[in-house]
Image (tube, grey):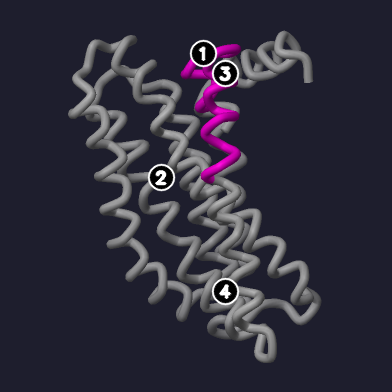
C-alpha cells in the first residue's frame, strides 16, 4: 500500500472511535469462549488438521512476540512526546514481561478447563484491545495499564496453550513441529520492530499502535 493510502485507512479507523473499534473484539471473545467450551479439555475440532494447527500457532506466536518486542521502537517517540524518563517508560516492558510469566500459569489451568481455542482467542482479543488503547494514552499509568497489564496477560495465553496442543497432535514429529511453531517467535521479533519503526516514521506512534 502507498503510505498515503495506509495513513488514510488508519485515520478512518481512528476517527471511528475506540468504542466502536472494541465492539468486534467483544464479539470475538464471546465467539471463542462459546466455541472453546464445546470441545473436550485440550481438544480441537477433528476438522482442523495438523498443518492448519501448526500454521496458526506459528502466526499467533509471530504476531504476539513481535508486538511485544516492538515496544523498544516506541520508547523514544513516547519519551519525546510526553517528556517521561526512559527508565520509567522502559519499565512498562519489564512489567509486561512479568505479567506474561505470571499469566502463563493461569492460562495453562484455563486451557485445561475451556480448551486452547477459547484461551488463545481471548488472549488475542486482549492484545488487540491493548494496542488500540495504547494509541489513546495520555499518562504513564495508562500505558502501564494497557501495554503492561492487558497486553502482558493477553500474550501469556499464547505459548503455553499452543505448545501443549501441538505436542498432543504431533506424536512422531513432535520436536520438528515445536521447532517450526517456535520459529514464529524469532520471525516476529525480526520483522515487526522494523515494520513498527517504518510505521512510526510515516504515520506517527499513535496510528502505528492502531495499525499493529
Which residue is labeled 1 in the image? 204
Which of the two discs, 2 and 1, sits closer to the camera?
1
**Cα–Cα gap, marks 4 and 2:** 23 Å
Q: Secondary structure at mark 2?
A: helix
Q: Is residue 152 left or right of residue 53?
A: left
Query: Pointer 2 and pointer 3: residues touching (CB < 8 Å)?
Result: no
Residue drawn at point x = 41 percent, y = 25 percent: 74
Which one is in front in this view, the residue at disc 4 or the one at disc 2?
2
Q: CA distance from mark 2 to mark 1?
A: 20 Å
The mark found on residue 151 in the picture is 2
Snapshot quadrant of residue 91: top left
Q: Mainly helix, strand or loop, the magenta region?
A: helix
Q: Earlier in the sequence, mark 4 or mark 1?
A: 4
Residue carrying label 3: 14
Query: Is the residue 166 above or below the residue 129 in the image?
Result: below
Q: Which residues are magenta?
A: 189-209
- How far is disc 4 from disc 1 in space, using C-alphas? 40 Å
Question: For numbered disc 3, what is the local secondary structure?
Answer: helix
The earlier-in-sequence mark between 2 and 1 is: 2
Q: Position of residue 71 (x, y in %)?
A: 41, 33
Q: Give the crowd class for mark 3: few <14, some 14-19, many >=20 residues within 10 Å.
A: some
Judging by the rendered image, the residue that carries numbered circle 4 is: 37
Amino acid at each position: 500500500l502507498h503510505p498515503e493510502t495506509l495513513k488514510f485507512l488508519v485515520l478512518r479507523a481512528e476517527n471511528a472511535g475506540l468504542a466502536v473499534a472494541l465492539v468486534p473484539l467483544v464479539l470475538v471473545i464471546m465467539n471463542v469462549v462459546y466455541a472453546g467450551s464445546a470441545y473436550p479439555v485440550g481438544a480441537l475440532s477433528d476438522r482442523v488438521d495438523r498443518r492448519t494447527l501448526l500454521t496458526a500457532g506459528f502466526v499467533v506466536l509471530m504476531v504476539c512476540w513481535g508486538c511485544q518486542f516492538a515496544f523498544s521502537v516506541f520508547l523514544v517517540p513516547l519519551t519525546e512526546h510526553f517528556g517521561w524518563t526512559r527508565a520509567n517508560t522502559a519499565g512498562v516492558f519489564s512489567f509486561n514481561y512479568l505479567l506474561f510469566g505470571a499469566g502463563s500459569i493461569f492460562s495453562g489451568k484455563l486451557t485445561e478447563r475451556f480448551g486452547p481455542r477459547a484461551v488463545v482467542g481471548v488472549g488475542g482479543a486482549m492484545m488487540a484491545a491493548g494496542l488500540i488503547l495504547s494509541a489513546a494514552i495520555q499518562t504513564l499509568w495508562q500505558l502501564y495499564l494497557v501495554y503492561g497489564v492487558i497486553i502482558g496477560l493477553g500474550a501469556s495465553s499464547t505459548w503455553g496453550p499452543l505448545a501443549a496442543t501441538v505436542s498432543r497432535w504431533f506424536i512422531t514429529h513432535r520436536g520438528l513441529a515445536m521447532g517450526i511453531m517456535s520459529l514464529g517467535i524469532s520471525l516476529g521479533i525480526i520483522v515487526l520492530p522494523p515494520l513498527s519503526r517504518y510505521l512510526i516514521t510515516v504515520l506517527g506512534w499513535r496510528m502505528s499502535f492502531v495499525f499493529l
